[in-house]
Amino acid sequence: MQNPTMAIINAIKDQLRQHNYNYYILDDPSIPDAEYDRLMQQLLAIEADFPQWITTDSPSQRVGATPLESFEQVTHAVPMLSLDNAFNGEDLQAFDRRVRERLTKSSNKAIDDIVTYTCEPKLDGIAVSLTYEKGMLVTAATRGDGSRGENITQNIRTLDSVPLSLLGKGWPDILEVRGEVYMPTAGFEALNKKLASNGLKTYVNPRNTAAGSLRQLDSSITATRPLELCAYGVGLVSDDDSLPGQHFDILHQLQSWGFKINDQMRRVQGIEACLDYYQLLASKRASLAYDIDGIVFKVDELELQQSLGFVARAPRWAIAHKFPAQEEMTRLLKVDFQVGRTGAVTPVARLEPVFVGGVTVSNATLHNMDEIQRLGLCLGDTVIIRRAGDVIPKVVKVVQERRCESASPIVAPTSCPVCGGPVLRDDGEAALKCINGLRCSAQIVQAIKHFVSRKAMDIDGLGEKQVQALVDADKIKNVADLYTLDPLALSGMARMGEKSANNLLSALQKSKSTSLAKFLFSLGIREVGEATARSLALYYGCLANIQTADMESLLNVDDVGPVVAQRILHFFANTDTLLVIEKLQSVGVYWPEFDPIEEQAKQESLPFKELCFVVTGTMSSVSRDELKSQLQALGAKVASSVSKKTDYLVAGEKAGSKLTKAQTLQVPVLDESAALAMIASGLQVLEEGVLMPN
Ligand code: IVH
């Protein structure tokens, strides 16, 4: 009979394994994290008392092995092959034709028969092979040269998505599972952010990071890295009858034994459907939570796979259809320094144009001088540019081997490239700053651009070039001067015909009627975005009270912490600023003031008052801004970035990194129609609330 404590230990282990599976494999946790932690603590406590009962597949045994001196070599029982590539639709059609011709020759099929394919994203990571004997993980190895790889068992054991022992039943005595270890984008970005903030070298891309993380001799380092394993096939299988006869079904069988498989995987009929799948995934590429570099198509029937066989190091029954590369090499021609609204002087790389991530790139941000130093970047260097999804292009690495003798250091400017004023670096800040403030024309132009922008005073007809021209011609020195423009002042300005001038003047006139929140936002107070401006307006109800508020009072406002409060105090302490505000009011800019207590009470009764939304992507029936205002009208807060505090992400078409982040943080995602339905039900609650008798 089993010892009772042993029975308890086994029951806890089984529960933990099942919860791991729900969480990491099915992405569908069934208990809160805290409950999981409690179970784990129980297991650790019992194992501490009875160390003789610790088994290698215990959920407590993922970390803790002693660091290795070097990796041992492992010979793969079945070689790990690579794939042929297709770079366009024709290559893919040709692959299908070859498959059908061969199958006809071997009389498995008629030439016109449609072949069933499994379509899988080609994950950009590291191929590994895991060997299970009698259901226990015994060895994990890298691909190496395909015949021999490195033994990385200790490291692989630290991945939560790898079962240490197989779940369920029916597995063969020996089972080799093949798959890709990868690092999801969000984890990669978080890791790089941490490295950069410690002044350390950052990783170029998630793939290199995954490779670096797997090749750690100390598995406790691997354990800190957010790596995942996705299974895409099998190697040696001691008993063929234990697996289904179709590739797609085999992967689902692996899922039931404890492996993660890709949820985008589909089984389709014929090559046209494969091409459709390729297009579909190409459009989803940027919003996936991980990097993919193409699609793998595999003949689904194992019998047909066997009849097709292999050439050299690749199977004839599979092909990788590659996406456009997200990284390319080019040359850094020069570095310009741009001055922003806050005076920050930002280096921008001017590059020899290069096609990367589907577009031609000739500029990339370099952020600040620290970044240039970290990259070790010199003028004339050959660099690697990365453009993934909707993210702005970035210089990720200098190709040292290609450095030429004429490469010269990048020198930080000591004076402002626009106004010639002094440039300083504040303590604790990475950016260089022109301290001339609104005496620097670059900062004036940027401040005016912000003032006229759609979410601020919404004045149509003034692009950067026109603003620059008006500033250069000395016709405006600050935002209030805009309202003194007249047909005479505008006549003769480039890009300003009579019609445009009239349109601009009426846009200016129209903009005079605004709201306190929009006016505050348009002033461009540092750290005061749309949401903070709304909170300030709601809390104070009138401008005078905001101008005279002290630190203590400001800290009572939602979203306002000491840093923001300091910025606000500093802003209103400037007499030049106060003069501009007075002038704006004297030329007729006005907004209704209100009793904040009444307004807050109104807000309190709104149905979405507890909810925080983020809206991203393209909507089809409303604009993103319209959707945001509808949510705000129901009391919701609309933030600009996804965090743990976000209640819902509304994601339209072509949603990018915000969707990825929401998925990682498990923030619920609504599509456009779900969001509109929610708004409709909010409106109903509001109406019913109003109709309800007291
Ligand atoms: S199948 C015999 N499926 O791509 C078939 N490979 O260029 C072998 N990869 O070394 C591979 N996702 O690292 C396959 N769904 C997938 C894959 C995949 C990524 C990688 C794998 C392999 C390389 C081949």
Image (cartoon, grey):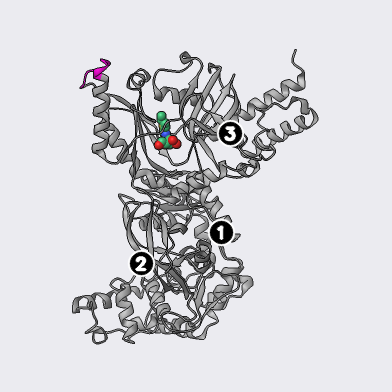
Q: Quadrant of residue 174?
A: top right
Q: Earlier in the sequence, mark 2 or mark 1?
A: 1
Location of residue 200 with respect to 187 vertically, above or below: below
Q: Main secondary structure of the magenta part?
A: loop
* Location of residue 571 in the rendering, given as x and y in whole percent from the top left corner: 52, 78
Label 2–label 1 contact, CB within 8 A? no
* Location of residue 682 in the rendering, given as x and y in whole percent from the top left corner: 43, 48
Q: Is residue 185 visible?
A: yes
Along the line of sight, the residue nearer the viewer: 466 or 318: 318
Mark carried by residue 454: 2
Disc 1 element:
helix
Q: Earlier in the sequence, mark 1 or mark 3?
A: 3
Label 1 or label 3, whichever lies nearer to me, is 3
Q: Residues within 10 Å of mark 2 (few under 14, many from 20)?
A: some
Q: Which residue is mark 1?
A: 196
- Going 50% across and 47% down the picture, which residue do you hit? 208
Q: Which residue is mark 3?
A: 151
Q: Is residue 398 visible?
A: no
Would you say residue 267 sits in the magenta stretch? no
* Location of residue 112 in the rendering, given as x and y in whole percent from the top left corner: 20, 22
Residue range (magenta):
104-111
How far apart, in angstroms, are the residues tagged by discs 1 and 3? 31 Å
Label 3–label 2 contact, CB within 8 A? no
How far apart, in angstroms, are the residues tagged by discs 3 and 2? 58 Å
Mark carried by residue 386: none
If the picture is divided into quarters, which one holds ligand 1? Answer: top left
